[in-house]
Amino acid sequence: MSKYRHDLPQLSGNRLLTDGGLETTLVFHDAMELPYFAAFTLMEEESGRDRLKRYFTRYIEVARQHGVGFVLDTPTWRANPDWAAKLGYDADRLAELNRRCVAFLVALRWQLESGRTPIVINGVIGPRGDGYQPDRLMSAIEAEAYHAAQVKCFAGTETDMISAITMNYAEEAIGIARAAGKAGMPIVISFTVETDGRLPTGQTLRDAIAMVDRETGKAPAYYMINCAHPTHFEGVLAEKGDWLGRIRGLRANASALSHAELDAATALDDGNPQELGGQYRNLLRILDKAVVLGGCCGTDHRHIEQIAGHCLAETVAA
């Protein structure tokens, strides 16, 4: 474990912001070519690194304006072996780029972190397969072996924590959590759900969280929900219970369309930022432990500004 590792202020109940939909912003707003939505490839060119710096800086400034911390994600959602192979990267080059993504964010933290705005560097791990459909189901043992290399990359850097984002079945989440535990890294699991509030496999969110906790000895520091609109999962949150306290983060989509509809869309549906901010505020009345607030597909700085305005108590000078 790195001697440089920061504390995780969100574990003390401090509210933090994070960014929106990185890949959808780059593709639809910036008209960038991003094969397979693989943003880690931007590390290869100075122009790509400059674009990422502008992207993250804008969000960090929102956090600074509100006097809260920020969870700074590595652009590594696609930086695993299967997706990298499609792009022509071997294991050594992939590992190097994972580490470079962290180093890039460490430099950004040095520039922009302040006393009121601590910055937590979050190593992002995405699903082995498609984020919307669990097209290849691994056992937990297989998932641990598959994702271990990326976990080890992060563990050898100044990464503060790891998050498995857009998990669509429990076994993959279990494998990643076990790998992170063996590497001594704090791990967060973020599930995605369909319009009925269930995982794409049909498992309930409540049961998925219970299964991961049971099979890992409650290894995840907490859980999140991402890549779904609030209207897709607000109904399942009506089930009272201690499990709601395990959910400490929200990264919703801007659009209320289903995953299938979004997959087929040729234009970006960015929804209504102000309405989304109000929906987050309503969700926090149920998810009173949720402290990490950001966005997913279709969201940009406008949505995060609205979420901050609706959900943070006051705006202060950085």
Image (spheres, rainbow, N blue to C red):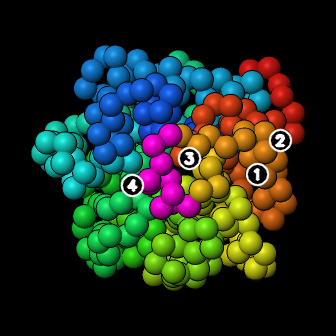
Q: Residues within 10 Å of mark 1 (few under 14, many from 20)?
A: many
As drawn, the label of residue 296 is 3
Task: Check disc 1 and report the residue beneath it.
Answer: 280
Task: Judge left or right: residue 183 versus residue 236.
Answer: left
Q: Looking at the rendered structure, which numbered label has been put on residue 310?
A: 2
256 drawn magenta: no
Q: CA distance from mark 1 to mark 2?
A: 8 Å
Q: Can you give x and y, in whole percent of width and height, for residue 211 in the image?
A: 51, 82
The residue depicted at 44 percent of the width and 62 percent of the height is 132
Single out the mark in the foreground, 3 or 4. Answer: 3
The residue positioned 65% from the left and 23% from the top of the image is 61
Whole-percent x, y for residue 170 in the image? 45, 75
Residue in view at x 13 percent, y 42 percent = 88
Predominant SS of the magenta segment = helix
What is the secondary structure assignment of the residue under circle 3?
loop
Q: Is residue 40 visible?
A: no
How packed mark 4 is, by other alpha carbons closer than 10 Å (few <14, some 14-19, many 20 or more), is some
Secondary structure, mark 1, is: helix
Q: Quadrant of residue 258?
A: bottom right
Badge 4 is on which residue?
126
- Quadrant of the snapshot with the C terminus: top right
Cα separation between marks 3 and 1: 13 Å
Amino acid type, residue under disc 4 in the picture: Gly
Q: CA distance from mark 4 to mark 2?
A: 29 Å
Q: Residues within 10 Å of mark 2 (few under 14, many from 20)?
A: some
Q: Earlier in the sequence, mark 3 or mark 4?
A: 4
Question: Do the CB atoms of the residues marked 1 and 2 lie less than 8 Å apart?
Answer: yes
Can you say whether 77 is above or below 137 in the image?
above
